[in-house]
Amino acid sequence: MIYLDNAATTYPKPNSVQNAVNTALKKYGANPGRAGHSMSLAAAEEIYRCRTAAAGFFNAPGPECVAFTLNCTHALNYVIKGLLKPGDHAVVSCLEHNAVMRPLQKLMESGVTVTRVRVFPGDNDATVDAFRSALRENTKLIVCTHASNVWGIRLPVERIAALGHVYGIPIAVDCAQSAGILPIDMADSGFDYLCVAGHKGLYGPMGTGMLITPDGSELSTMIEGGTGTNSISLDQPQTMPDRMESGTQNMMGIAGLRAGIEFVKSRGVKTIYQHEMSLVQNLYRRLAEMKNVKLYTPEPDAPYYAPVLSFNVGDIPSETIAQKLNDSGIAVRAGLHCSPAAHDFMGTLTQGAVRVCPSAFSNLGEMNNFVAALRKII
């Protein structure tokens, strides 16, 4: 199979990730941080190594800033529901994933208000001005995707963060599609909350994610329970990462995530981005020459796009094209990609779109086979 559904989860995983998971099953089988025996301590040390690797990778203040979650959606819910109260106002972009929009929709039932800001692809000044115009006296949070999971459109999140800080408004950045592919520096960017998927551009196992923040004490908790620390108290800890990590952690997944972070670091984020973008640009040019193929953005390029490309063929349902590609041994994703807001922006709510996303392991030969298969379908 030619796997081009890496925006959903990367495949294959590096050998180092597979080996790390297997090693954890054998060597770190005890509950980390819940006992004083050697295997429990070894498991806790492995988790700390992953925290340290993640903090270094994203230039966070320290490993204590890294809380492990099940996925990016989990992290986003922690921030959105932990900060916003009835009467508060939140600002989001018009490209947000349902991981952002559904928690906000739920909070709107209790009096939270939300403004969707129009994004201007390729015009960062206009996008920042639109965010500025949406701010209110009761705005308590900006939630913003770093890169659209459908169209690859990058938002000027660093400038939006700076804007928010002028008005004392924190920003949570959804990095599900950008972590490991686009450079992210928490110290320089001013992000208050970084929400990360571990199983996409970081090449970790599914069931891994992170919430990275210098100060989690501002967040009301959604889950309380055992943390292995200060067990005499029935109050949830105030400090990170314990505040956000009740219950037994995904030991094997976290071990794999550490190996994934180290894999990306060894390859280089810039190198991975350039490789994937070159494949997407090559595909874009060839699709642009094909009859009846609809492309919705200009040719993707830095600094305005991530390496994700979505298209349609005439008025044929996107799911039909994806199924025919699957019959040819090519895996892509079609439909709405859990992002109806992004499809509404492009006018594709009815048809959806066929999405192609390469990885560090994809190559030009696979793109050639993809084009050949699509030509036969057309």
Image: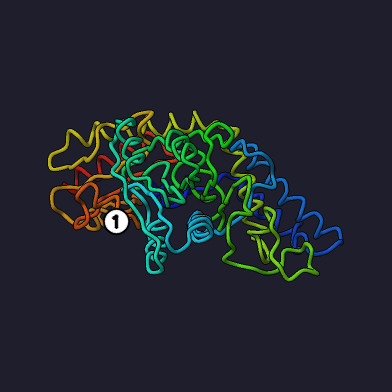
> Residue placed at 13% from the left, 43% from the top?
292
Q: In the visual, does 181 lie left or right of 313? A: right
Along the viewing direction, whichever of 193 and 28 lies nearer the viewer:
193
Identity of the residue drawn at 31% across and 43% down: 151
Tell me the quarter of the picture where residue 207 sits: bottom right
Q: Is residue 81 above or below residue 240?
A: below
The foreground one among 378 and 216 is 216
Question: Up-down: is 73 above or below 369?
Answer: below
Q: Quadrant of residue 49?
A: top right
Q: Position of residue 223 (x, y in %)?
A: 60, 67
Q: Residues within 10 Å of mark 1 (few under 14, many from 20)?
A: many
Q: Residue furthest right?
A: 37
Residue 34 is situated, as x and y percent measured from the top left of the image, at: 78, 64
**Left or right side of 170 for 217:** right
| Residue in the image at 64% along x and 41% along y | 55
Q: Which residue is mark 1?
A: 340
Residue 11 at x, y percent in the picture:
48, 49
Callout 1, which amino acid? Pro
Q: Is residue 46 above or below residue 181?
A: below
Q: Nearer the viewer, residue 274 or 134?
A: 134
**Tag 1 secondary structure:** helix
Colour style of the rendered protein structure: rainbow
- Asked if residue 266 is positioned above or below residue 31 in the image, the reply reads above
Answer yes or no: is residue 2 visible: no
Total numbered labels placed on residues in the image: 1
Residue 294 place in picture, x, y as percent: 18, 42
Q: Is residue 313 visible?
A: yes
In this rendering, position of residue 64 left or right of residue 75: right
Q: Residue furthest front?
A: 137
**Image point 27% across, 54% down: which residue?**
322
